[in-house]
Image (cartoon, rainbow, N blue to C red):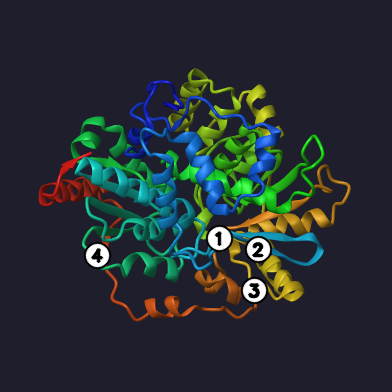
């Protein structure tokens, strides 16, 4: 298995090189040069596997054995999932009127990001210990990614992590999960802006190939292919949990509803579709609706501003993973993608070619919901099931409730499951706005009494320069190994 950039400027990288990277040197994103196709017999055999076993099978397809032998891979994944609250790691809540909620949030930070991040952290430890090298991770976050990335590598030898979050645009719990960490390999910056604003200096850093190589920079945002790879597994898990009998041919279809911001999860779903999984994907966004407009109208253009909603982790108007989706669904046309993305990043506007728009809308459907929709969905789910949804999970469940009212809509009769991406405990203000009572675990309450640490990045300052200075300081003080 080899990897290439979506823009065609980089070919035949191996998994290790891609893991220790961010954006590709040509500005694109790394993807496998080919997507393995699974036959019906394989899918039926996979249906009997646990979640952890499914992750192992998916990773085994994309990581050659000479890099991580299968026995080592199994041990790494076992360690990665050892901190999860459930032995089964992921579970499905089966609620009233056919509502199935796939709980992906039972990790250390109570968010779905822990599923992939915990695995990627173990991959890093595995390679760094062999190479005797140092890596500096640079992460921009809209909320959950930052704390999950920190948990995956806090205290780890050979790694420093720099996390930048939008001050005041995450929930108090999300901020505390990032700013209360004491390990000296964790460096947190609070930026006066949006998560999209934060992405700009980080993309510039990774476009400087010499700087990246000199300081061993890498990303744990979903720009990192390894994150997407692991997330592919939960589409298989959701399908097998929600599909009717797999004895008949062709295999039945299942609709999987994904609360969507940066589009990493939707990218993983599209990879699963290309592998042969018979699912229909629904991307549901909040009022930051660029993906919805792209799917419905072919209009992939930035809005004037990012709206601050009750679902802050998906308050994103520049979902860079859509480049992967477009590349995959264009038939891996790197030349087309280079032109489209250069147009988008120079003008902020893009009209999808008709053929590409048609293919995207055939694989992914979409919906946009308001804060009012989110609150009403949280309230209804509690009243009918005594089940608390986080606002992001409510974004997905709102689609289920809407479909119940439109029985004649195409695909309305398909079995459906909604991905729940975080615990409601992380979003207490949204729970209160729904007129409900938050359930706050002891580990969340403990954060409120801890000392916080972060460095401000003020509007008008050169954020790229601040990050460069910090990276250079880390490199000058870490003596334990060469940079990757």
Query: Does the residue at mark 3 contact the one at mark 2 (Cβ under 8 Å)?
Result: no
Dot 2 or dot 1: first in sequence order is 1
Q: Which residue is mark 4?
A: 183
Of marks 2 and 4, which one's residue comes earlier in the chain? Answer: 4
For the residues labelled 1 and 4, the Cα–Cα distance comes to: 29 Å
Q: Is residue 353 left or right of residue 29?
A: right
Say whether residue 9 is left or right of residue 361: left
Q: Secondary structure at mark 3?
A: loop
- Please state which of residues 379 and 47 is positioned toward the viewer in this rendering: 47
- Is residue 217 shown to the viewer in this render? yes
Q: CB atoms at circles 2 and 1 under 8 Å apart?
A: yes
Q: CA distance from mark 2 to mark 4?
A: 36 Å
Secondary element under disc 1, as helix, strand or loop, is: loop
Task: From this view, report whether residue 438 is shown above or below residue 316.
Answer: below
Disc 3 to disc 4, C-alpha distance: 37 Å
Check disc 2 and report the residue beneath it.
374
SS type, badge 4: loop
Give residue 221's position: percent from left, percent from top: 41, 47
- Mark 2 vs mark 4, foreground winner is 4
Provide the secondary structure element on which disc 2 rests.
helix
């Amino acid at each position: 298995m080899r990897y290439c950039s979506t823009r065609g400027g980089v070919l035949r990288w191996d998994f290790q090189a891609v893991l220790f990277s961010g954006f590709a040197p040509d500005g694109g994103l790394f993807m496998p040069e080919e997507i393995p196709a699974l036959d019906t017999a394989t899918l039926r055999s996979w249906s009997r596997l646990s979640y952890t076993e499914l992750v192992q099978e998916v990773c085994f397809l994309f990581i050659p054995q000479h890099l991580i032998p299968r026995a080592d891979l199994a041990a790494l994944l076992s360690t990665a999932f050892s901190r999860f609250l459930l032995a089964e790691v992921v579970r499905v809540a089966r609620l009233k009127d056919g509502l199935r909620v796939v709980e992906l949030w039972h990790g250390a930070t109570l968010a779905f990001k822990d599923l992939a991040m915990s695995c990627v952290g173990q991959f890093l430890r595995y390679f760094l210990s062999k190479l005797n090298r140092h890596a500096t991770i640079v992460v921009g976050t809209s909320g959950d990614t930052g704390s999950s990335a920190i948990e995956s590598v806090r205290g780890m030898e050979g790694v420093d992590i720099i996390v930048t979050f939008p001050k005041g645009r995450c929930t108090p719990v999300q901020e505390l999960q990032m700013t209360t960490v004491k390990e000296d390999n964790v460096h947190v910056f609070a930026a006066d802006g949006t998560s999209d604003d934060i992405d700009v200096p980080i993309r510039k850093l990774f476009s400087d190939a010499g700087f990246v190589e000199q300081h061993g920079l890498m990303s744990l945002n979903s720009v990192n292919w390894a994150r997407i790879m692991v997330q592919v597994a939960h589409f298989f898990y959701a399908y097998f949990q929600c599909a009717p009998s797999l004895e008949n041919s062709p295999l039945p279809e299942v609709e999987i509803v994904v609360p969507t911001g940066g589009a990493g999860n939707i990218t993983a779903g599209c990879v699963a579709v290309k592998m042969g999984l018979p699912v229909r994907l629904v991307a549901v966004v909040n009022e930051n609706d660029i993906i919805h407009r792209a799917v419905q109208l072919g209009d992939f253009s930035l809005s004037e501003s990012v709206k601050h909603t009750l679902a802050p982790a998906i308050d994103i108007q520049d979902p860079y993973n859509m480049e992967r989706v477009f590349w995959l669904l264009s038939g891996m046309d790197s030349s087309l993608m280079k032109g489209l993305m250069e147009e988008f990043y120079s003008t902020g506007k893009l009209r999808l070619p008709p053929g590409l728009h048609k293919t995207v809308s055939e694989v992914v459907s979409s919906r946009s919901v308001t804060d009012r929709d989110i609150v009403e969905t949280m309230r209804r789910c509690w009243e009918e099931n005594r089940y608390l949804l986080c606002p992001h999970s409510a974004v997905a469940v709102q689609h289920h409730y809407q479909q119940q009212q439109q029985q004649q809509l195409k695909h309305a009769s398909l079995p459906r499951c909604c991905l729940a991406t975080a615990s409601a405990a992380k979003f207490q203000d949204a729970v209160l706005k729904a007129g409900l009572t938050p359930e706050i675990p002891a580990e969340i309450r403990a954060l409120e009494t801890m000392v916080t640490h972060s460095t401000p990045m003020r509007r008008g300052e050169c954020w790229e320069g601040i990050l460069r200075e910090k990276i250079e300081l880390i490199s000058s003080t870490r003596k334990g190994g060469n940079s990757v």
